[in-house]
Amino acid sequence: MKKRVIFDLLRTFSKKELRELKRYLNSPYFNSRRVLADIYEELLKYYPKFDAERSEEEIFEEVREKCKIIKSSFIVLISYLTQQIQNFVKQKSVEINHFASNNLFLDELRKRNLYALFMRHSKIMNAQIEKDKTYFQDNIFQLYKYYTNLFNYKAITGKLNRPTSIKKQVKIIDQATQNLTLYYITDTICYFLNAYEYQTGFNLHKDKNLPRVILSNLNLEKILAEFKGNYKYDYVLEVYVKLLKMYAEPTKTEYYKSFKGLVETYFNRMSKSELAFLYSRLISFCIGRINEDKSIDYYRKELYGLYKNYIESQLFRTEKTEYLSDTLFRAILLNAFALHEFNWAKQFIEKYSYNLNPSHAQNMYNYSNALLNYKTGNYRDSIEFANKVNLDVFIYKYDLKFYQLFCYYELGEYDPAKSILHNYESVIRYDKLLNKDTKNSYIRFLKYYNRMLRSSLSKKQQPPAGYLYQKLQGERDVMHKEWLIEKTGQLAKAQEKMRKAQ
């Protein structure tokens, strides 16, 4: 049976969504095939790992037998169930955005000439707008649609022959334009930032993208001055203009400070998803400055504070996911290590590993403790934690093996180190998921590590550690190059001392 997307869909569901999907499938209005609900019940037994321990073929075979269905019918039913799950996701997406669903409803009422009902629900929606004090990006375009709907309704049904009625209609036009302008400018800035990061990553010419050209031709300061005091979300435009300046002139720390200050000032007036986005921009900017090696200590400390605020405010929990990502978890940890914040790192691991996806939380917990214990000099404990990680389903398996090699070297236990070297060089060479550059940097590390071991074990000190130390200085793409330079340097000094003693 070919690989199917049903597991990929269900893996993204929270337990609450799984319960809602069950009710959806049991509703005759949405689903006329009762057997789909039965198949779904059986598939749920494998949530959330699904095919991590069994193959899809094995799971489907077990479910087919329990539901008493022939194979040809079962394949068709799985397709139907997948489509029903997709329909459920579509419905949920509309329900989540109440502005979008209300706009669709208002539009339908206007088309049906149900004007009294239109005005009643329009007033309800307007009350929601007035009540909502926080900015949510996805709602801005819907607010534009709402005022457009209201304008069209007034144009068709209203008596626009008096100054007061005309003024109200013009006000509606202003409100529609304000929301459309904010949506257009903020989204264009977002696209500019995406283009900027892509072009920076591949060292391309940064002027050649349409968002940059459009933004350079807009007088944003004048538009901001027009909005100031006249629009509910005028502060959002100010935040985004500062964000643009921060990226336009990244060497000026005052622009970073100004943007960060505004985010903190308006923290309670932004939705959680908007805050998550703005903090991600601050974090990304700091990482970019660190990679450029500009004010590295300042931005590492800034990054440390941003990460703390991000996780303590639970900004990683959004409408799309309730889990902290493994990548972010690791990045927070490595930055804490760089600042020697080991006590905080330990507290972070203990507290936030439970916020990772349950299917790999234990692996990340053991991996993180392996790194922490290495950093704090507890090499034996580091190896023990590393040995608890299930490498078959772990994305950072190579990273973990490198740290094991570090530990064995520090402990002077060269036999297990040689065993890792022997096994992992061939594994790395034949790993199709690794890109060529990463693969080469891994292999170069193993090559130098092996030479360093030979130098340590050889009575003739061959190859000389001093030679390895000098050669490493000129190398470019070697994983953990700094560690190798440090250790070959120490070994070279020890060898020189032995020669002098002889």
Image (cartoon, rainbow, N blue to C red):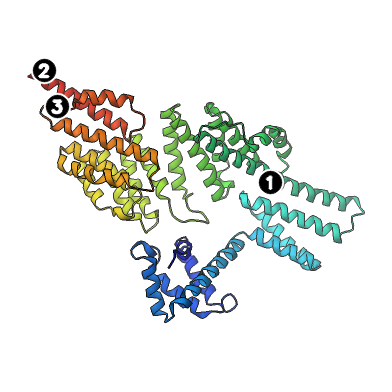
* Residue denoted by label 1: 232
Q: Earlier in the sequence, mark 1 or mark 2?
A: 1
Residue occupying image coordinates x 17% and y 38%: 411
Residue 266: % across, % down = 58, 42
Measured Cα–Cα span from mark 2 to mark 3: 14 Å
| Percent position of residue 451, x then y | 21, 32
Please say whether residue 346 is visible from this viewpoint: no
Residue identified by numbered label 3: 461
The answer to which quarter of the image holds residue 7 is bottom left
On residue 500, the disc is: 2
Mark 1 neighbour class, 10 Å CA radius: few under 14, some 14 to 19, many 20 or more: some
Q: Between label 2 and label 3, give the one nearer the viewer.
A: 3
Residue shown at the point (11%, 17%) measured from the top left: 500
Q: Secondary structure at mark 3?
A: loop
User: In the orientation shown, which residue stands out farthest toward the bottom?
Assistant: 68
Please, what is the three-letter code of the amino acid marked with disc 3? Answer: Gln
* Outermost residue, right side: 161
Quarter of the picture containing the N terminus is: bottom left
Mark 2 or mark 3, which has the lower sequence index? 3
Q: Residue furthest top?
A: 500
| Residue type at the position of mark 2 | Lys
Looking at the picture, tell me which residue is in the foreground, 133 or 469.
Answer: 469
